Image (cartoon, rainbow, N blue to C red):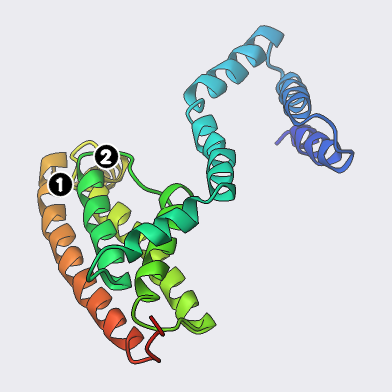
Amino acid sequence: MNYLVLIGVAIIIAGFILKLDVVAVVLISGLVTGLIAKMGFVEVLNAIGTGFVNNRYMSLFFISFPVIAIMERYGLKERAAEFIKKIKGASAGMVIWLYILIRTIASAFSIRLGGHVQFIRPLILPMAEGAAQKHVKLTEDDIEKIKGLAGASENYGNFFGQNIFPVASGVLLITGTLKEQGLDISNTAVAKYSILAGVAMVFIALVQCWLFEKSLRKGEKADV
């Protein structure tokens, strides 16, 4: 094994320590690693270009960070909380369960609607807190519990919803693994049985959110 290729890792570490330009450090590391691995210069550039094209959509994910930060700075969370407070009968459990339902349906059609950074933190969490404050005075422990359930709602909807779409990455992984073990199964079959799991999850989540809301309201009534 050619351990010299690990020099590329050392270059990245050194570049970060010296606070050099990240893009330049990564490109130099890639070039050095490729040349040490006895790849041609053009071949190295081709590999870097191919990697960039295949992963270019990752940049959209990172772009969302500053956008969300700017929106929060100018009152997105406050407006979301005020909006939900105006809805009669709104509760933290209802807000979170409705998000689970919407997230599951969106994932079933492979619609990328959701995310802890894009939806939970700036929208769902403040809406759930705002709804809860209509009924109880929230303690730090209550807020942490709401954060936990709100974060879990994203995982519920995404995990159980995505496999309902026949060509989702999870379905392809399942069918590929099972076929390697000699089991003849189609993507459609996996998606069909995933519908049952998704529906069951939605109803179980409904019970969980109802129990959560019930336990939350055992606290002190808010002075409204």
**On the image, which quarter does residue 6 sit in?**
top right
Tell me which numbered mark, 1 or 2, is placed earlier along the sequence: 2
Residue located 26% across and 45% down the image:
107
- Quick check: 52 above or below 153? above
**Residue 97, x across and y down, in percent:** 25, 65
**Residue 65, x across and y down, in percent:** 56, 42
Name the amino acid type tagged 1. Answer: Ala
| Left or right side of 34 for 156 | left
Give residue 191's mark: 1
- Residue highlighted by disc 2: 168
Q: Quadrant of the C terminus?
A: bottom left
Q: Are marks 1 and 2 in contact (CB under 8 Å)?
A: yes
CA distance separating discs 1 and 2: 9 Å
| Left or right side of 141 for 131 | left
In the displayed image of the protein, which residue is found farthest to the top?
A: 42
Q: Secondary structure at mark 2?
A: loop
Residue located 80% across and 29% down the image:
21
**On the image, which quarter does residue 90 sit in?**
bottom left
**Residue 115, x across and y down, in percent:** 41, 49
